[in-house]
Image (tube, grey):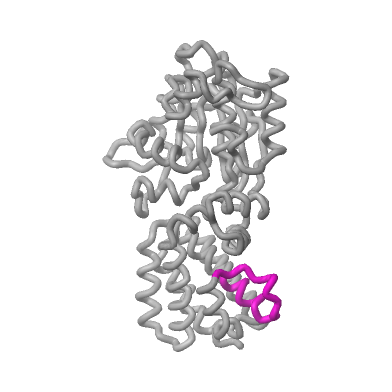
Amino acid sequence: MLFKNIYGQEQVKQRLLTEIREGRIAHAQMFNGPAGNGAFALALAYARLVLCKHPTEHDACGQCQSCIMVDRLEHPDLHFVFPIFKRGDKDALCNEFLREWREMVTENPYFDLNDWMNKIDSGNKQLTIYRSESENMVHKMSMKSNQGGYKVMIIWLPERMNDTCANKILKMVEEPYPKTLFLFITEDAESVLPTIKSRTQIIDVPAFTQPVLEQALSDMNVLPEEATIISRACEGNMAQALRIITSQGENDDFIERFKQLMRMAYVRNVKALKTWSDEVADMNREQQKNFITYCQRMVRENFIYNFQQPDLNYMRNEEAQFAVKFAPFINERNVIGIMEELQLAQFHLERNVNAKVVLFDFALKMIVLIKNR
């Protein structure tokens, strides 16, 4: 990954390039922003430039041995830490998942947690950076540089690092070994251990703008009209946009489940709603949260549909067809209540409350809310 290949984020790129040119490379940097914002791609391009043997003023050369090793994610001075799950009783190490990690990053550097969970088939297991990883991190960063330059560690989603691990690496971040660079990539800086966060330079990476996302999709041969609809719906999340164009499966599943929910709530079919909630609960936790987010978008779009202003609607064809008859059921008397219940369900799912209970409770409340028209 080179800076020139990264879509948008020009302001962040210039800041990173300026710091390198002026020799002001902070030893610990935290790239903070929403999922799908390209922060990992930026960090990887930055690491590549720092490790490059023949850098230009604006990018890595892309041809030296160092660049070739980074291409394969096999550079001996470039290390990765990321959340994983236990395959046995002992704490797991990232090295056990390195093959899957390299495959995913090589295929698509604009991934998010949902992509990673699907890649390693984690199911409903919680992904964590375990205590044992801290010993690995200290060992790798304390060794002499293999290529004689920087040693770089990219830590993806440090908010999923357990407290023991975070505390064990604190001294290393606070008093770094010479020529070491830590690049933390977080979607929630407030959830990172405060003592680690306070010792990093924060770099805010915003979501992609709609024009940038449209351009990226157009470059992937997505038709202009479809690119506009997808970019609007994804709200700057490149990972989500790529999932839509590479696999319709999840999106098709979400619209069908949304239709089922609303139809069963309207006819007050409690037994069917219980089955529905159990099936959604069988998804992994990230898919459940993604589905709730999808429902929020559909409620919002159907409410706006009632105002007869197509330029304000960001629905795909199948969604728009459903809205023709369904939109009147989402109105000023119930839209706030429905959105509040969706937000409450999302809050509980994020805190690992029993998904079957959360989703069935929400489905039952929809019986009352959908009738309020």
The residue depicted at 54 percent of the width and 14 percent of the height is 149
Q: Position of residue 121 (x, y in %)?
A: 34, 49
- Name the quadrant containing residue 340: bottom right
Q: Does the segment drawn in magenta span residue 304?
A: yes
Q: Farthest residue in the left direction?
A: 88
| In-front residue for pair 296/171 | 296
The correct choice, above or below, for 291 with respect to 67 in the image is below
Q: Is residue 193 visible?
A: no
The residue depicted at 42 percent of the width and 67 percent of the height is 253
Q: Is residue 50 visible?
A: yes
The correct choice, above or below, for 274 with respect to 251 in the image is below
Left or right relative to 199: residue 263: left
Bounds of the magenta segment: 298-316
Q: Position of residue 38 (x, y in %)?
A: 58, 43
The residue depicted at 40 percent of the width and 38 percent of the height is 101
Left or right relative to 14: residue 64: left
Q: Position of residue 260 (x, y in %)?
A: 43, 78
Give the total number of marks visible in the rendering.
Answer: 0
| In-front residue for pair 41/6 | 6
Q: Does the segment drawn in magenta span residue 361?
A: no
The residue depicted at 58 percent of the width and 17 percent of the height is 54
| In-front residue for pair 47/317 | 317
Q: Position of residue 199 (x, y in %)?
A: 63, 28
Q: Quadrant of the C terminus?
A: bottom right
